[in-house]
Image (cartoon, rainbow, N blue to C red):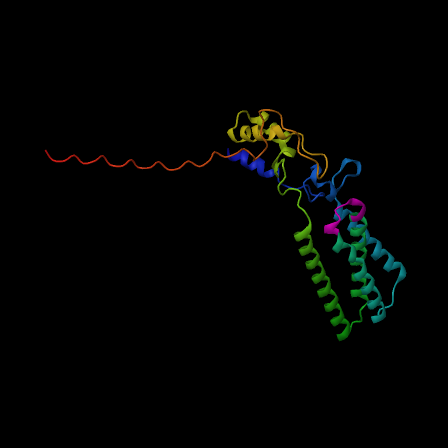
Amino acid sequence: MNRSISDLSALGRLPALAHHPTCGRHDHHLLRPFGLALCLGCTSMYPGIAAALGGLLLAAPDQGFRSVITLGVVSLLCAGPTFAQPFVQKRWFKVPARFTLGVGIGLLLGAVWCAPFSVLGWAARVVMVAAAIGLAATALTLRQRHAKDPCLQCPWGSYPLCAYNLPAIQRMRDARGPDPLLDGLIAELSPLAPYPPRFGAAPPVRRPGQVAFATVPLAPPQAPPTASPPPPATPPG
């Protein structure tokens, strides 16, 4: 039993390059070039950072407050699409939005570098870094409030104990034989397979005699038995 719990916990480890579960409900968080699941945000953002830093190396802006202001303003504008991203969960928007965010981060690094090495220059660096941290915290808060987590209220189970991992759970069961925990999970998840190919897909139609995961109606609570009244006392003879 302990080994089964450990193996089931391992199913919850997210792939190193995906940063999300790789089931179909997370497709809007993923890119799949050549069948390899990659985190859409990171895969789109880091090239933007590299492009901005490469452009700065080629442009070689002067070190001074004019460059700081120019790069800082453009960097701030590049962060704009990120604040709309929680409301537009589509790849066609998220990929350029993340790339633009990466460009903004690269330009911010350039602005920090271009600031003069003086008291005012260091003060400008502190202000820029603090503003970047504040914007990042605001964007994360906005995302937590408005971006829908595909795993919440998922009709295919609760990740990692869901229909997406049913084949892996079945392989565990085949490898070690009867196991009450694995057998129970397979019995509950089997009616839900296959897992949805895309985010927002409707649950599979249940066949007669099968129930959906975690939707088995509970038996109504039974009222506690009432104590029977004591027998009437017999009058003395």
Position above or below: 73 against 172: below
Residue 162: where, in percent of width, then height? 61, 35
Classified by dominant secondary structure, the portion drawn in magenta counts as helix
Residue nearer the viewer, 208 or 128: 208
Is 84 on the left or on the right of 230, as rendered? Answer: right
Residue 221: where, in percent of width, then height? 44, 37
Residue nearer the viewer, 188 or 16: 188
Q: Quadrant of residue 195?
A: top right
Whether residue 47 appears in this view of the structure is yes
Q: Name the quadrant of the C terminus.
A: top left
Name which residue lies at 89% across and 59% down: 58
Residue nearer the viewer, 216 or 115: 216
Count of picture labels: 0
Is 59 on the left or on the right of 99, as rendered? Answer: right
Whether residue 64 appears in this view of the structure is no
* Residue that extends furthest to the left in the rendered view of this protein: 237
Range of residues picked out in magenta: 85-93
Residue nearer the viewer, 76 or 119: 76
Residue 86, magenta (yes or no) = yes
Residue 113, magenta (yes or no) = no
* Residue that extends furthest to the bottom in the rendered view of this protein: 119
Residue 206: where, in percent of width, then height? 63, 28
* Residue that extends furthest to the right in the rendered view of this protein: 59
Residue 115: where, in percent of width, then height? 80, 69
Name which residue lies at 77% across and 39% down: 32
Is 160 on the left or on the right of 237, as rendered? Answer: right
